[in-house]
Image: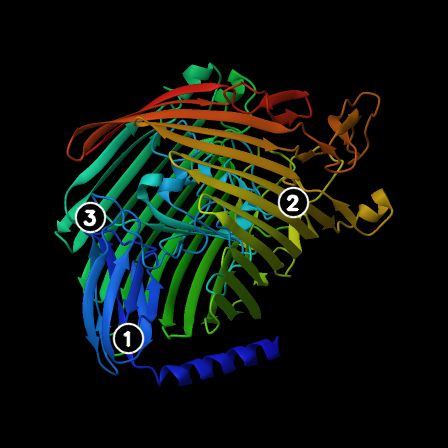
């Protein structure tokens, strides 16, 4: 590791030395002329009289930066599919540092051939690059859903390697990791438990999204604090030119959004809100209890402070309340098993292009909270509250052959839990955790088609006396129609989420420090190959491995109780993703397949008495070996038909051998008169498999333009179109079962202006 860090510092020194010999630098922001939105992926190219090319693509802020430009006259072209190309002539002198902002207008005629067309990394379902998948609202619109507005959760569930707990529960497992091991960021803010109890929905409606980067593994040193994956969400800015909005209604949820300028062309606001209407909609359609209530609200204030700086303030609130695994009306009316959580985050972001230095600087400040309760609302049996304050800065130095990024972060967490004995060997008190650290990242581009990104992250926990050094690396090599990608690194998670996975209906989560003192650690390795044999087809395959140490899982016990202890465990994940993407005129479709094998090694003390060894290896309840998704979208005569079929092999569960009566001998006991408590006798933990899961979803949408920017859209959808009975939950005491949601016909309406 010391050698790795020394080589990295040497690379930084050599790159900085090279930067001092650079000439002119051109940078700026690219925006949509109609509403002021940043345009990611725009190609900004400089051409000299000799035909030499220099260029960059704009990032999610619309920022581009071209450095190392020799003095002279250049012809600038900014091009993007669907927009008119912007052209200009620039005369650049030595040591010039020019800020040149660009606005593109939507093309009304045929698109001309682009000078350079480089897709952003990870774009498209088959654009998977080193575990990175980029998602836009246009991608989300391809997935059939009972909601006409679309939601990020529906697209994530269509990706291989992403295992959902079901239509109910709001839990996503990414490539073998737990939901609490996923880092979710919204405009740089940490968001706890953002997925709603109904699996179609998250706190992120499509209408507020700009770009979402999902790192299923192998993420770079800018990210830290989680050991499985990163979901980095960038929201769009409000319209800076005119007032706009939309309102929608569907059987599960009703939503509204308003946006517009506060100072035209410079400052905008966006406000969004959604509220579940299950009692009045879906529950009546299905004629079965669906005791769920959820809502989410979002706002964003964005300002272009000057030609070279911008700032934003974002806020999110998400609320869920419900009972998982309801089998009858009496249980639906009871609140003794009710879980409730409220997640909130607010943050500020400032982006600056200094006038004298060729860098981009970003400053982030945020506060995130989560409140969890389980049981009666007035007297919950369990509760857990967490608060996290984050301050971080990120700086990128742009150079012709390499970019240097570095950053610092400071984090303070307050963790409070009252678990009612649920985890008997976990301290129930208030903990304070402080963290400070930083990272360095090189993006080397000296070889044509090669992007090599070594980096290292440093983290220190003064309150716990711990320090970590985590090397990371990502690499992409493009040659013609071929692409090869590699990624890997080391990751630690000081703050963990505790959940009892023995019961699929228990989604209560308590955030705390690692119970056994040892911090969970993971090592990732990924390798992928991508090919585009034709302009209309693309194929990618990626293999991955994760090793995880110092995990905490629920202990197994033969005692008839709902409380438990925690036991240490290690884990290993081995898997493969394959994806095919096709675009042919009005048709778009993809098929993906995922294989993953997740194994845990439990280290409970009693294991040697039960199984004859000091450890026991098993498949955890989210070990879904095989997944298959097929999605098709066809646009004809203003109708949009979307179809999705999904398949998942059975999940593990603990089988019951039978029942007996258990008498706890706490003193003199009449064993002939004492009936005792009913106890389930299990076989090996998670030794059985539930039936496989498959489902067909279909939607048909038609938009009607009323005038100008005003339109009405109508959606008809069918979820689980052939009414497959997919098992979700088994009550091992009564042997009653609960299925996933049955066939759900739905009609949605949306009004836009």
x and y percentages locating residue 236 in the rendered image? 29, 49
The C terminus, quarter of image: top left
Q: Earlier in the sequence, mark 2 or mark 1?
A: 1
Q: Secondary structure at mark 3?
A: loop
Q: Position of residue 73 (x, y in %)?
A: 22, 75
In this picture, residue 505 sits left or right of residue 719: right
Is residue 629 visible to us here? yes
Q: Which mark is residue 716?
A: none
Q: Residue extending furthest left?
A: 264
User: Residue under circle 3?
Assistant: 35
Judging by the rendered image, the residue that carries numbered circle 2 is: 596
Contact between labelled residues 3 and 2, with CB atoms less than 8 Å apart: no
Residue 259 vs residue 563, the one in the foreground: 259
Residue receiving disc 1:
25
**For the N terminus, which image quadrant?**
bottom right
Q: What residue do we see at 59% from left, 31% from top?
A: 647
Residue 729: x and y in percent read 61, 27
């Amino acid at each position: 590791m010391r050698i790795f860090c020394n080589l990295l510092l040497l690379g930084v020194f050599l790159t900085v030395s090279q930067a001092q010999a650079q000439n002119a630098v051109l940078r700026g922001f690219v925006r949509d002329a109609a509403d002021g939105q940043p345009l990611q992926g725009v190609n900004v190219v400089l051409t000299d009289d000799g035909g030499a090319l220099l260029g960059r693509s704009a990032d999610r802020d619309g920022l581009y930066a071209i450095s190392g430009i020799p003095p002279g006259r250049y012809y600038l072209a900014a091009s993007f599919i669907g927009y008119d190309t912007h052209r200009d002539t620039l005369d650049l002198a030595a040591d010039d540092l020019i800020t040149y902002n660009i606005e593109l207008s939507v093309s009304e005629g045929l698109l001309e051939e682009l000078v350079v067309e480089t897709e952003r990394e990870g774009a498209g379902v088959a654009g998977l690059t080193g575990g990175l998948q980029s998602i836009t609202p246009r991608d989300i619109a391809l997935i059939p859903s009972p909601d006409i507005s679309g939601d990020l959760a529906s697209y994530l569930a269509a990706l291989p390697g992403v295992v959902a707990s079901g239509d109910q529960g709001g839990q996503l497992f990414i490539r073998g990791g737990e939901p609490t091991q996923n880092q979710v960021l919204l405009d740089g803010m940490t968001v706890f438990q953002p997925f709603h109890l109904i699996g179609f929905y998250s706190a992120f409606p499509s209408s507020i999204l700009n770009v979402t980067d999902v790192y299923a593994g192998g993420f770079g040193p800018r990210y830290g604090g989680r050991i499985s994956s990163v979901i980095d969400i960038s929201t769009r800015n409000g319209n800076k030119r005119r007032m706009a909005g939309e309102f929608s209604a569907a059987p599960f949820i009703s939503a509204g959004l308003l946006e517009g300028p506060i100072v035209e062309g410079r400052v905008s606001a966006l406000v969004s809100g959604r509220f579940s209407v299950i009692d009045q909609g879906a529950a009546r359609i299905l004629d079965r209890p669906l005791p769920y209530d959820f809502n989410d609200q979002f706002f964003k204030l964005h300002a272009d402070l000057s030609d070279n700086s911008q700032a934003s303030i974002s806020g999110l609130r998400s609320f869920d309340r419900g009972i998982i695994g309801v089998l009858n009306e009496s249980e639906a009316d009871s609140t003794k098993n009710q879980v409730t959580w409220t997640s909130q985050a607010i943050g500020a972001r400032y982006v600056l292009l200094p006038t004298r230095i060729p860098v981009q600087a970003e400053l982030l400040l945020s506060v995130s909270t989560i409140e969890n309760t389980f049981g009666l609302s007035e007297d919950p049996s369990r509760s857990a509250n967490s608060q996290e304050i984050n301050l971080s800065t990120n700086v990128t130095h742009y150079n012709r052959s390499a970019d240097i990024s570095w950053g610092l972060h400071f984090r303070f967490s307050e963790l409070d839990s009252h678990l009612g004995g649920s985890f008997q060997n976990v301290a129930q008190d208030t903990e304070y955790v402080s963290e400070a650290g930083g990272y360095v990242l090189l993006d080397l581009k000296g070889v044509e088609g090669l992007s090599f990104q070594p980096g290292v992250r440093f983290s220190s926990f003064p309150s716990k006396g711990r320090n970590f050094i985590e090397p990371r690396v990502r690499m992409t090599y493009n040659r013609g129609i071929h692409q090869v990608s590699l990624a890997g690194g080391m990751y630690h998670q000081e703050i963990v989420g505790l959940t009892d996975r023995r019961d699929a209906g228990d989604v209560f989560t308590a955030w705390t420090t690692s119970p056994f003192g040892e911090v969970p650690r993971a090592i990732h390795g990924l390798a992928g190959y991508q090919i585009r044999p034709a302009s209309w087809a693309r194929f990618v395959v990626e293999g991955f491995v994760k090793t995880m140490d110092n995990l905490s899982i629920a202990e197994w016990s033969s005692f008839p109780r709902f409380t438990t202890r925690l036991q240490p465990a290690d884990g290993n994940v081995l898997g493969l993703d394959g994806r095919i993407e096709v675009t042919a005129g009005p048709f778009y479709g993809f098929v993906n397949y995922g294989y993953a094998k997740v194994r845990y090694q439990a280290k409970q003390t009693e294991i040697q008495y039960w199984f004859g060894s000091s450890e026991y290896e098993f498949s955890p309840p989210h070990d879904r070996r095989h997944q298959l998704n097929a999605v098709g979208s066809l646009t004809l005569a203003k109708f949009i038909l979307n179809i999705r079929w999904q398949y998942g092999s059975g999940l593990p569960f603990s089988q019951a051998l039978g029942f007996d009566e258990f008498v706890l001998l706490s003193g003199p006991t009449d064993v002939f008169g004492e009936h005792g408590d009913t106890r389930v006798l299990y076989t090996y933990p998670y030794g059985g498999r539930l039936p496989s899961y498959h489902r067909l979803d279909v939607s048909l949408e038609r938009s009607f333009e009323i005038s100008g920017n005003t339109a009405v859209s109508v959606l008809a959808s069918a979820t689980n179109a052939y009414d497959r009975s997919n098992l979700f939950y088994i009550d091992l005491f009564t042997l009653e079962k609960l299925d996933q949601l049955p066939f759900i016909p739905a009609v949605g309406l949306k009004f836009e202006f």
